[in-house]
Amino acid sequence: AGGVLPVVKHLPGHGRAGADSHRTLPRVTAPAQALRASDLAVFGALADLPMAMTCHVVFAALDPAPATTSPAMIRLIREEIGFGGLLMSDDLGMEALDGTPGARAAAAIAAGCDIALHGNGSPEMLIAVAEAAGPLTEPARARAEAALAARRSPDPADPAALSAELAMLASGQAA
């Protein structure tokens, strides 16, 4: 209602990850059948949403590489889960991935991500990420345009009423 598009996070799932990918690379050791039956299955219901973000998690039964940089895992996202929208990497500045930010961006794009995200860093670092990611491919551009076309104008809103509602909710009072 606010004119904002949803982003499905984090494909193909953080549910079994026992570590924080901001600090280290999580490794999920569940069998492939268990992953497909539960962890991956929940994302199928969201496959028609316009945008999604990968996860920096290794699913050992499916591929030894982190999902963000794994062509096999991106294929799984596209083909098994059926996600056809704009696929962006999780933040490449997180500690889960090895290499320079530029190398991480290049690996994410080579694996099949449409967009490589890097949340913050020096201007030089951000330039290196942008250069490594390169321009959008034609399929990525088409998915980006489709995502933008899915936006709708926000419903009318009263900022004062919304602020009052937020204050009430933050104070623990029921609406």
Image: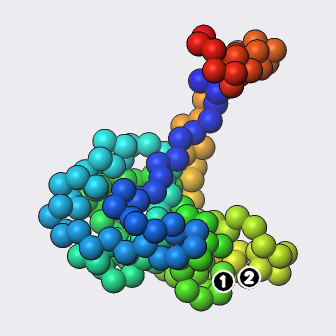
Quarter of the N terminus within the rendering: top right
Q: Which residue is mark 2?
A: 128
Compared to 124, does 45 lie above or below? above
Instruction: Estimate the spatial distance between the alpha carbons at disc 2 and disc 1, rounded to whole Å.
Output: 5 Å
Return the x and y of residue 116 as percentages of the image width and height: 60, 69
Could you tell me the amino acid type at mark 1? Gly
Which residue is drawn at the image coordinates 32% and 71% (left, top)?
28
Q: Is residue 35 visible?
A: yes
> Residue shown at 64%/30% (left/top)?
3
In the figure, is residue 115 to the left or right of 85?
A: right
Q: Write the residue at 39% across / 65% down.
A: 17
Amino acid type, label 2 = Ala
The C terminus is located in which quarter? Answer: top right
Q: Nearer the viewer, residue 40 or 166?
A: 166
User: Which residue has dot 1 on it?
Assistant: 102
Image marks 2 and 1: residues in contact by CB distance under 8 Å: yes
Residue 24's disc number: none
Q: Does 127 sit left or right of 60 as displayed?
A: right
